[in-house]
Image: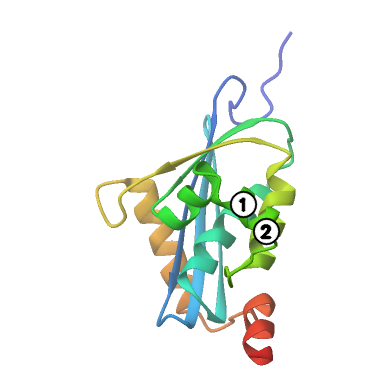
Amino acid sequence: MHKETGPKTEGHPLKIYTDGSSRGNPGPGGYGAVLLWGDAKKELSAGYRLTTNNRMELLAVIKALESLTKKNISVTIYTDSQYVVNSVEKKWLDNWIRTDFKGGKKNKDLWLHFHAISKHFKLRFIWVKGHAENTWNNRCDELATSAADGNHLLVDEGYEEVKSEE
């Protein structure tokens, strides 16, 4: 006899929606992510005291992937960040890594972190229009902006460390 133990996820693709926000660029920022797998849903968010929008867009993807316990699964990531989508889908990231981010490409710390964890999944990125009719992208925007406006903001060490060296 088969016993139901939780939400039905088997046979369903994993979908992740992500968004990043910053109040000023740079300024306080946050990310939001919604993970959907069958009947299961998980939301993630955090705010940072000083960061950029692109860092939060990328960090949302990283934190969502880090939260996964299963590896070697197919994941579709929906984001309104063309920076994130194009960097991966158009293989810009591969070139940046090959040239050690020559020419001052930004966010090296996050991109290298993403690259390392991305090897554990079969990823596909899909761009969605921001602030439109997409329920899950809008929810991610709410999570990201609420996190950016929060009282307990974290330190984006990768960003603040680079800024202190300049």
- Crowding near the residue tagged with mark 2, few <14, some 14–19, many ≥20 C-alpha atoms within 10 Å: few
Give whichever of 149, 130 is nearer the camera: 130
Give whichever of 81, 48 is nearer the camera: 81
The amino acid at mark 1 is Asn
Q: Is residue 114 left or right of residue 83?
A: right
Q: Measured from the top left, where is residue 66 in percent x and y? A: 70, 51
Q: Residue at x 31, y 55 (%)?
A: 130
Task: Please tell me whether residue 117 is drawn above or below residue 10 in the rendered image.
Answer: below
Q: Which residue is mark 1?
A: 95
Q: Is disc 2 in contact with disc 1, using a CB cutoff of under 8 Å?
A: yes
Answer with the quarter of the image where residue 1 lies: top right
Which label was assigned to residue 68? none
SS category of the residue bearing label 2: loop
The amino acid at mark 2 is Thr
Q: Measured from the top left, where is residue 60 in percent x and y? A: 55, 58
Q: Can residue 86 be seen from the camera position used here?
A: yes
Give whichever of 67, 56 is nearer the camera: 56
Which image quadrant: the C terminus? bottom right
Q: Is residue 138 left or right of residue 113?
A: left
Q: Can residue 42 be seen from the camera position used here?
A: no
Task: Please tell me whether residue 30 is drawn above or below residue 60 in the rendered image.
Answer: below
Q: Is residue 113 left or right of residue 19?
A: right
Measured in 3D between alpha carbons, the distance from the residue under mark 2 to the one under mark 1, in whole angstroms, is 6 Å
Task: State the residue lying farthest toward the left.
Answer: 133
Which label was assigned to residue 99? 2
Q: Residue at x 39, y 47 (%)?
A: 136
